[in-house]
Amino acid sequence: MTSSSGASRRQVLAVAAAAATAPLLAGAPARAAAAAAGSKTWDLTILGTSDTHGNVYNWDYYKDAEYDDSKHNDVGVAKLATLVNQIRAERGSKPTLVLDAGDTIQGTPLATYYAKQEPITVTGETHPMANAMNVLKYDAVTLGNHEFNYGLPLLAQWIGQLGFPALAANAINEATGKPAFLPYVIKEVPLAGGDSPTIKVGILGLTNPGVAIWDKANVEGKLIFADMIATAAKWVPIMRQRGADLIVISAHGGDSGTSSYGPELPNENPVALIAQQVPGIDAILFGHAHNEVVQKFVTNTATGEAVLTSEPSKWGQRLTRMDFTVTRENGRWKVVSKSATMLNTNTVVEDSAVLAAVRGQHSKTVDYVNTVVAQSSEELSAAESRYKDTPILDFINHVQTEVVTTALAGTAYAGLPVLSIAAPFSRTAIFPQGDVRIRDVAGLYVYDNTLEAVVISGAEVKAYLEYSAKYFKTFAVGDTIDPATISDPLVPDYNYDVISGVDYDIDISKPVGQRITRLVMPGTDNPVAADAQFVIAVNNYRRSGGGNFPGIVKTQVYNQQQEIRQLLIDWAQAKGVINPVDFYVPNWKLVREGVPVF
């Protein structure tokens, strides 16, 4: 697959028409020093977004209300556009480029609707994120790992709808060994000033190697994902040879240097290592970890130069602003100062042009998610699902178990007990008493995972549960436990699983790896034998290695590519009533020395 359409090839040579005029927020001392030395300086601004995840409107589709959180953040490309346009206006004729570091077309019901309910590959309609981003007029976007969630045909169609290049230098076409997408773009940018010189800005895009695990079904045999550090080391010198005066990397990977998977794939979060190890980089805009990193300098070990890095949070909550001051020395451009600041989108209103471009698609999505699918006999909440066995999480496990059990009837696996795993993705999901809408179910299961199943032994079940139980901090008997701080902050909620189909206790007074103190067959005192055989229902993210859980990456005995969220909706619609009596089976608890914590 390739994104090298005629339009994309033309974009490689495109000239950035930029914008903007007030004094820079940073770099004045360096400019003054350069001026004192008799050197003329110019300035350039690069704005960065990342992990917008299908957010255009400042809207929470799960609550059917304006988005708000405890810190009163706002979200969406429409808010970002207002900030971008303000900075362009402020800078006037001075150049301003706008980049995005990926994870764009997945994450909200809006994005899901145009991938699943009315897929753009069927209708030919322009994707809402293409509509929004084209109004904002980005200069380039990097492909994030979530760009691959809906398959390569939809990704190719979205890329073709963009009015700017999509980059991913380390995504390699397995058949040809060549880049499957544009690796980089070099933009010839006019600098404002008397003689109007130009500077060539090279933008290199790096996507996340984890795609090979997380979207194995979509990319296996088609794409290979090379190491981000090695790929930068390959392309940065080439870009310099081809005239790039200033090099910015737009990378979809965090800066921690660690991965959520094992050593079988290149590093998931290598941004600091790229800055440290690859000479010739001026700045890195990065994403993936959903952190807010305003300005972080990393010293390159080969050159001693400081590389500017910045990560603009998630969902359009923040906009990175990088400011560069440059001068000409011996016929070459030199960066004399660089800095970054962060802007909060909750300080502005939404851009009317972006809203207008997506209004029809937003309205259609709102109507869809408000469709009533069932009646709930009582209110079911996910608020305590991390540390208590709750009916709402059992609802997920019951549906998954039922689907797999039915599918395996009459097969060689029909006689095996079926277990199921579910993670507490949301702390705020609620099925209200009475009408349950699609948005309520979608709010419980916020990811576009599909259902799979594998065979697992009793020993592997125990190892899996021990690994999952590392989610909890250790609390000695007698220690006060606050549910708000019960978990290890380094382990996200989506990497903690509960299992149905066996009964077990998690002793959080014990060390990690020794916490499953009771593991028995349901409703009995019979320990689960190490060599017992089970089928376990699991989502595709987990089964393909997401979270690095043990014993689960193996050949599936069930995989019909059915989306779990849709299976939950279908079950609710078929039943008409969601009643815990039909699915709630308390089978696990937190303990200390055998005494229940809650």
Image: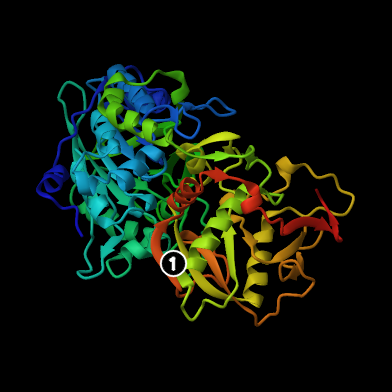
Residue 183 seen anywhere in this rendered image of the structure: no
Q: Nearer the viewer, residue 308 or 332?
A: 308
What residue lies at 46% left-to-right and 74% top-to-bottom? 557
Q: How many marks?
A: 1
Q: Nearer the viewer, residue 250 or 385?
A: 385
The image shows residue 5 at horizontal and vertical percentages of: 13, 50
Q: Report crowding for label 1: few under 14, some 14 to 19, many 20 or more residues within 10 A (C-alpha).
A: some
Q: Nearer the viewer, residue 97 or 318?
A: 318
Q: Is residue 464 above or below residue 143?
A: below
Q: Which residue is mark 1?
A: 265
Residue 465 appears left or right of 569: right
Quadrant assignment for the N terminus: bottom left
Q: Is residue 162 above or below residue 94?
A: below
What residue lies at 27% left-to-right and 56% top-to-bottom? 152
The image shows residue 310 at horizontal and vertical percentages of: 44, 39
* Secondary structure state at the residue bearing disc 1: loop
The image shows residue 292 at horizontal and vertical percentages of: 50, 37
Residue 438 appears left or right of 82: right
Location of residue 320 by image quarter: top left
What residue lies at 57% left-to-right and 27% top-to-bottom? 71
Q: Is residue 192 above or below residue 102?
A: above
Outermost residue toward the right? 478
Q: How is the image coloured?
A: rainbow
What residue lies at 44% left-to-right and 47% top-to-bottom? 288
Residue 211 appears left or right of 259: left
Location of residue 309 by image quarter: top left
Residue 497 seen anywhere in this rendered image of the structure: yes
The image shows residue 278 at horizontal and vertical percentages of: 38, 56
Residue 90 appears left or right of 254: left
Amino acid at dot 1: Leu
